[in-house]
Image (tube, helix red, strand yellow):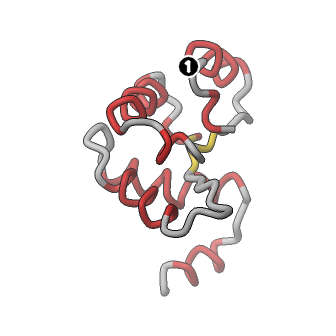
Amino acid sequence: MHAGWPMIDDMLAVMWAHRQVYVEVGVIVWALPRAEFYRYLQRLVDAGFGDRVMFGSDQMVWPGLIEHSIRVIEEAPVLSAAQKRDILYNNAARFLRLPQADIDRHHGR
């Protein structure tokens, strides 16, 4: 939850020890200053866990936060285009074991 923020070292240790652990960025994508969020995200990616980071919005009562949170990921200077797509879709699709037919449908194929 929230990628374990602010306990990055502990989060990295858990992810290293347990390959089935994924994280979501939830509230930290919009609640933290961008520089802090990007530093935290960079640590996860640099440690080799970019394929286990998922988008989360924590949008329950704050209108517009999903769009804002997606934009923060899309504008992340620390991520490649492929890494952004992984966080916004591919990692969750793999985690949820979506059938290829569903993935194709989501991509308009």
Between residue 104 and residue 67, name the one nearer to us.
Answer: 67
Q: Is residue 73 left or right of residue 28?
A: left
Q: Residue at x 68, y 62 (%)?
A: 60
How far from the left and from the top, in percent, is residue 3?
Answer: 61, 34
Rendered position, 1 above or below 39: below
Give amino acid for label 1: Ile
In the picture, which quadrant includes the N terminus?
top right
Q: Is residue 81 left or right of residue 73?
A: left
How far from the left and from the top, in percent, is residue 98?
Answer: 70, 66
Residue neighbourhood size for the residue with mark 1, other residues' Cα within 10 Å, grouped as few (<14), some (14–19), many (≥20): some
How far from the left and from the top, in percent, is residue 48?
Answer: 48, 27
Numbered disc 1: secondary structure: helix
Between residue 94 and residue 37, name the one nearer to us.
Answer: 37
Count of numbered labels shown in the rendering: 1
Rendered position, 67 above or below 81: below
Rendered position, 101 above or below 65: below
Q: Residue at x 44, y 66 (%)?
A: 67
Q: Residue at x 70, y 30 (%)?
A: 19
Q: Residue at x 63, y 21 (%)?
A: 11
Q: Mark 1 highlights which residue? A: 8
Q: Residue furthest left?
A: 77
Quadrant housing residue 62:
bottom right
How far from the left and from the top, in percent, is residue 33?
Answer: 38, 36
